[in-house]
Image (spheres, rainbow, N blue to C red):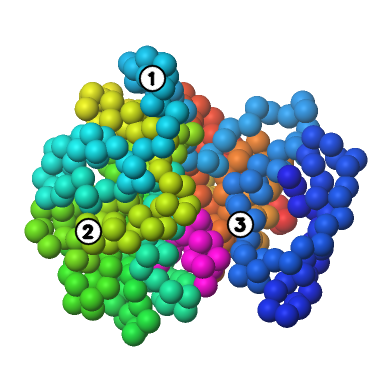
Amino acid sequence: MNIVGENCEYEGGLFLVYFHAAYVSRPERRTLMSLLVSPLIAAVHFPPISEVKCWLAERPANGRELIDLCQAVPDYAPARELTDHLALQLGDPLMSKYSPDEGLPEVRAAICDYYVRKFSAQLSPDNLCLTIGASQAFWLAMVTLCRAGDEVIVQAPYYFDHPMALDILGIRGIYAPFIEANAGVPDPATIEALITKKTRAILIVSPSNPTGAITPPDTIRELFELARRHNIALILDETYLEFIPGGVRPHDLFSDPAWGEHFIQIASFGKTYALTGYRAGMLVASGDLIHHVLKAQDTMAVCQPRITQQAVKFGVENLDVWVAANRDMMTRRHDLFRAEFMLPGNCFQLSASGAFFAWVRHPFSGCSGRQVARRLVDEAALLCLPGEVFGPGLEGYLRLAFGNIREEAIPEAVQRFRELDLHPL
């Protein structure tokens, strides 16, 4: 559904919202609706990827083939042995039933074994709650830790779904600024200066979405000690951890016997095993916190689907070599993209990059990222996201995702940036 017009009036603590809903497949159909909507959700922007993909409907039919640098999804299929395994599971009547809220014991045990290999982790199945993607894991962490009016320090540029969720919940996001000289790596001193009596957590995404920056293990340890000192939580979203070049260990926090007192991990297997549609997320925390998380889990989703759990179990037990090969492929894509983009003569500036992403400063002074991103669609058949959806004051940037662009298409994509006419917008 494409929202084509909206007017709001404030009435009795709620926004009275009038809008026309135009169905993309039936543009002649109009429905006038009058609904009472929370002012918290009314103030949140529309999902950015849905917004920019709506622009494609206005492209000329005979235009250049689109190069999609928008959504961070793997362009390759899941491993054939995984899908063959799942096909055999579908005949089991249990596959259509609920599992325990936190996930099947044998699946969580297999994940713990994987974490021993990956992190030398000291954790048990009671530390895990399997979720509907990493986004639900984030919601579970927030509703368990925070009340409306509490504060969470968020490193900018941020993954846009995080502040959207905070705003809807009435939790105040406090944004640590992007320091271009640090190439997107958080600065613990800057973050510590933002802590107040209302602070409940520090939120870091590494590798970063949108900059690709990989926070070094020493910095993660420093942030953990900072959280411990102030008796708050360090929440680390590690959705893209399997794309850190060389498969190096991202940190050593899980080897600390007291990790659960101040550390929460948001994890995802969707990118790792090319299962984004399966919504394969996970929250990792102390057993005490997971106990309370399950109260929210039961009201939100009950459980992760069993078929998704079986996919994750097969992946962590059998696909380390497959994952490593895809990680190496993504590293080649990143390195080629970076090398091509930084050749002389490109008016777009690469500010940070890594894993799936590049964070680029555009050359159009005084123009928003939306204006430039829309122009790239219209004039260069390039689809990317505007910087301002990743944080205040970031209108001068664009996010490029090369998870779904093959190596052979990268030089052409970069050339389109170089060829863009720089006449004023």
Residue 165 part of the magenta-drawn span: yes
Give amino acid for label 1: Asp
Helix, strand or loop at mark 2: loop
Q: Which mark is residue 369?
A: 3
Give the image location of residue 273, x and y in percent: 35, 30
The structure residue drawn at horizontal position 55% and vertical position 66%, both measured from the top left corner, is: 168
Element at label 1: loop
Q: Amino acid at mark 3?
A: Gly
Quarter-wise, where is residue 388 in the image?
bottom right
Residue 393 lies within the magenta run: no
**Which is nearer the N-term, disc 1 or disc 3?**
1
Which residue is pictured at 25% across the width and 56% down the height? 285
User: Within 10 angstroms of label 1, few (less than 14), some, or many (20 or more) residues?
Assistant: few
Residue 343: percent from left, percent from top:
43, 41
Mark 1 and mark 3: Cα distance apart in space: 50 Å
User: In this picture, which residue range is highlighted in magenta?
Assistant: 154-170
Quarter the C terminus occupies: bottom right
Binning the other alpha carbons within 10 Å of mark 3 as few (below 14), some (14 to 19) or many (20 upward) gives many
Mark 2 vs mark 1, CA separation in Å:
33 Å
Which of the two residues, 376 or 52, is positioned nearer the viewer here? 52
Pick the residue in front: 339 or 36: 36
- Disc 1: which residue: 92
State the image coordinates of residue 296 (x, y, percent, origin top left).
42, 58
Please say if the residues under marks 2 and 3 sit with CB atoms less than 8 Å apart: no
